[in-house]
Amino acid sequence: MERTGRPGSDGEHLLQQRLGTADRADRFYDEQVLDHLNVRMREFVGRQEMFFLATSDRHGECDSTFRAGPPGFLEVLDGRTLAYPEYRGNGVLASLGNIEENPHVGILMVDFFRDRIGLHVNGRARVVEDDEMRARHPGLPVDPVPGRRAVVWVEVAVEEAYIHCAKHIPHLQKVPARGRGRAGDGPRTDRPREPEQGRAWGTDDVKRKGGDFFGAAAEAREGRRMPPAERPAERPAAPTLRASAAPAPAAPVPGTELPEPARPEEWLEEAERVLAEARRRAAEKGPQPFSGWFR
């Protein structure tokens, strides 16, 4: 099917015809989809502290990720261009690798705290070296935290910009962090930027980055894998190893050792202790009238 002058993909146009939503879609295209960032969009982008990024490789295999920084870390270079820094990460470079193969990206910004509204930006991206970006845009901020110094930048040429409606966006509230003062105080926006206190910006500390929250490293150390019966049918099952043939766990790299998970009996002991304390307090207070679930 040949592309039309309408925004969106051929697939969505076909589904609009099939499901009878073409008129509604055309109104949305005409009234809400821009090929640039207008003044209000630029202001919105300039105060965001996070966004979600979608990329895919040349085969269409997708990746979705999260980016965060001080307000303005997603730079509005002009009405048709955005840029954001890529900091030192886990070394995988999944998003940047996808962009090298396929420049199409989707950015979603959601304001959970003030306006409860979202902004989609779709466009074509390219990876730019830090020196080149600063030569063209000398006003870009310099971050004093080593882990937040830009390794490279991603420059996005805007092709579509449109609203994400507030209907299902939850209203969240910021809470105070250590050394930050009042709830809702954002990180400083002075240039050069000051590191935000109480957050692990740029850290290499395994625990502060989340440790082995999902237990993947523990599974790797113990040689445990998903049982063949639970694997998707299209994926070939790995050969089954006898227990005697299982590889020995690799020695951890010094400085990256993770705490061992608590034994089941430890969890049970803690639960019994908490339950006993709750019963003791209830006995001291005596019978209390029920006053609702959300007092």
Image (cartoon, grey):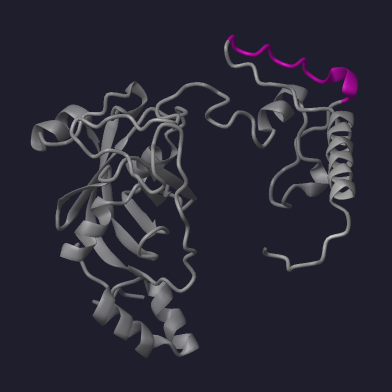
Coordinates of residue 249 in the picture (x, y in percent): 74, 16
Task: Tell me the quarter of the image containing the N terminus.
Answer: bottom left
Does residue 222 sit above or below 138 in this rendering? above
**Horizontal side, residue 76 vs residue 167: left or right:** left
Q: Main secondary structure of the magenta part?
A: loop
The image quarter containing residue 89 is: top left
Coordinates of residue 225 in the picture (x, y in percent): 76, 34
The image quarter containing residue 294 is: bottom right
Q: Which residue extends farthest top?
A: 254
**Horizontal side, residue 86 vs residue 242: left or right:** left
Q: Is residue 272 magenta?
A: no
Task: Tell me the quarter of the image containing the C terminus.
Answer: bottom right
Coordinates of residue 253 in the picture (x, y in percent): 60, 12
Q: From this viewpoint, is residue 21 visible?
A: yes
Q: Residue at x 19, y 34 (%)?
A: 141
Q: Residue at x 59, y 9 (%)?
A: 254
**Horizontal side, residue 237 vs residue 287: left or right:** left
Coordinates of residue 32 in the picture (x, y in percent): 27, 75
The image quarter containing residue 148 is: top left
- Which residues are drawn in magenta? 242-254
Q: Which residue extends farthest front?
A: 285
Does residue 225 sit above or below 162 in this rendering? above
